[in-house]
Image: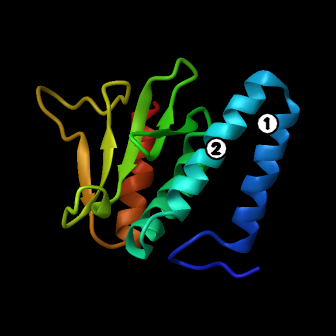
Amino acid sequence: MADTADGFSDFERAAMKERAAELKAQGRGGQKKADNLQAVIDAIAAMPDADRALAERIHVLVLEHAPSLLPKTWYGMPAYATEAGKVVCFFQGASKFEARYATLGFNDAATLDDGAMWPTAFAIVEWTPAVEKRVVDLITAATA
């Protein structure tokens, strides 16, 4: 099972499909979660290569480091929300508005508060180990 730096490995894709099947088997509430997860996977798959590579990595990291957040689409983009439906973080591909960079954004449900002013959106132009570490730190802080 190949693991690629710019996308989901075969293992990750299989695991997500299995999880979607598990949620469907849980009944009505599980069906909605499974449908939301599938909608996020489909939205990511439809992105141009550069956006898709970033969105896939963010998706994996959110599922791994913030398992309490539920995937859903928000304005057609991948987002991750609380059980109450409040979006904590979201990905916006550069192609969405023909911007020069993709964005990882956080809403007020995220706990990134730092004094009287703090950033709520972060531009991403390339995936590097340093970017991955920063994204993990942000996701962890947002859900603390």
Q: Is residue 77 left or right of residue 67?
A: left
Amino acid, disc 1? Leu
Pick the front one: 87 or 114: 87
- Residue 23 is marked as 1
Q: Position of residue 45 (x, y in %)?
A: 55, 63
Examine the rendered structure and indicate whether residue 102 appears above or below residue 21: below
Q: Quadrant of residue 87?
A: top left
Q: Is residue 31 left or right of residue 130?
A: right
Query: Circles 1 and 2: CB distance less than 8 Å?
Result: yes
Pick the front one: 83 or 37: 37
Q: Give the residue displayed 32% in from the left and 31% down from the top.
A: 107
Q: Give the residue displayed 58% in from the left and 22% down from the top.
A: 83
Q: Position of residue 75 (x, y in %)?
A: 38, 40
For marks 1 and 2, the one nearer the N-term is: 1
Q: Quadrant of residue 24?
A: top right
Q: Give the residue displayed 46% in from the left and 67% down from the top.
A: 52
- Residue 100 is marked as none
Q: Position of residue 32 (x, y in %)?
A: 69, 30
Quadrant of the image for the N terminus?
Answer: bottom right
Provide the residue designation for mark 2: 37
The answer for how far apart the CA atoms under marks 1 and 2 are is 9 Å
Amino acid, disc 2? Leu
